[in-house]
């Protein structure tokens, strides 16, 4: 029982629960954005009056195809994807690039085995090749 208790109290379980709650709330927010703002905007551009895409459908041989609901979900997906990209993916990519730039300044490649090693290393830890630091190279 104590193992189960420690499993539940670990930080990543709590973080996951918070992420699910925030994600569900965010989904509702985006759905409201699409339903209350974007759908009427599309209706205004196309000349319709307060469109409800969920009511859009067509019939072939007695079968009803409700494409409007699909359009609502498609617009919601596109909005969520754009928000996630611009608010999560793009900043994280920039942050990772910043950390990689700092890492590259602190390391160099071994000319023998191409392993990343500290910039001031005199010997490669992987292949044991002797290295001459840039400060000791002849000019």
Image (cartoon, rainbow, N blue to C red):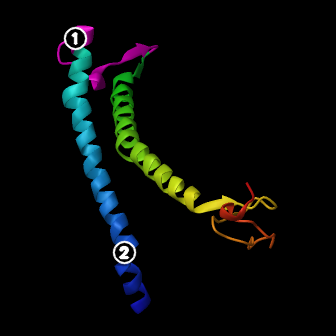
Residue labelled with disc 1: 48
Q: Which mark is residue 11?
A: 2
Camera-nearest label, 2 or 1:
2
Residue 7, horizontal then vertical, whole percent: 41, 81
User: Taking 10 as reference, is 37 above or below it?
Assistant: above
User: Taking 5 as reference, is 30 above or below it?
Assistant: above
Q: Secondary structure at mark 2?
A: helix
Mark 2 and mark 1 lie on one chain; the one further toward the N terminus is 2
Please tell me whether residue 47 belongs to the stretch shown in magenta.
yes
Q: Secondary structure at mark 1?
A: loop
Number of other residues with Cα within 10 Å of mark 1, as a class: few under 14, some 14 to 19, many 20 or more? few
Out of 126 and 121, give the one closest to the viewer: 121
Q: Which quadrant does the N terminus fall into? A: bottom left
Q: Is residue 66 visible?
A: no
Residue 88, horizontal then vertical, whole percent: 38, 47
Residue 43, horizontal then vertical, whole percent: 24, 15
Q: Is 1 situated left or right of 137 in this image?
A: left
Q: Is 105 situated left or right of 89 in this image?
A: right
Magenta residues span 44-61
Determine which quarter of the picture holds residue 124: bottom right
Q: Residue at position x 58%, y 56% from top?
A: 104
Q: Residue at position x 51%, y 57% from top?
A: 102
Out of 77 and 125, give the one closest to the viewer: 125
Q: CA distance from mark 2 to mark 1?
A: 50 Å
Residue 47, horizontal then vertical, whole percent: 23, 7
* Identity of the residue furthest to the top in this view: 47
């Amino acid at each position: 029982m104590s193992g189960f208790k420690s499993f539940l109290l670990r930080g990543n379980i709590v973080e996951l629960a918070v992420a699910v709650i925030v994600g569900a709330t965010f989904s509702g927010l985006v759905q409201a954005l699409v339903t209350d703002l974007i759908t009427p905007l599309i209706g205004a551009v196309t000349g319709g009056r307060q469109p409800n895409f969920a009511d859009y459908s067509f019939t072939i041989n007695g079968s009803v195809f409700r494409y409007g609901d699909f359009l609502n979900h498609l617009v919601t997906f596109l909005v969520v994807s754009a928000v996630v990209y611009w608010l999560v993916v793009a900043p994280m990519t920039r942050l990772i690039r910043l950390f990689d730039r700092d890492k590259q300044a602190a390391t160099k490649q071994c000319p023998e085995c191409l392993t990343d090693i500290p910039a001031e290393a005199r010997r490669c830890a992987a292949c044991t090749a002797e290295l001459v630091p840039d400060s000791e190279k002849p000019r």
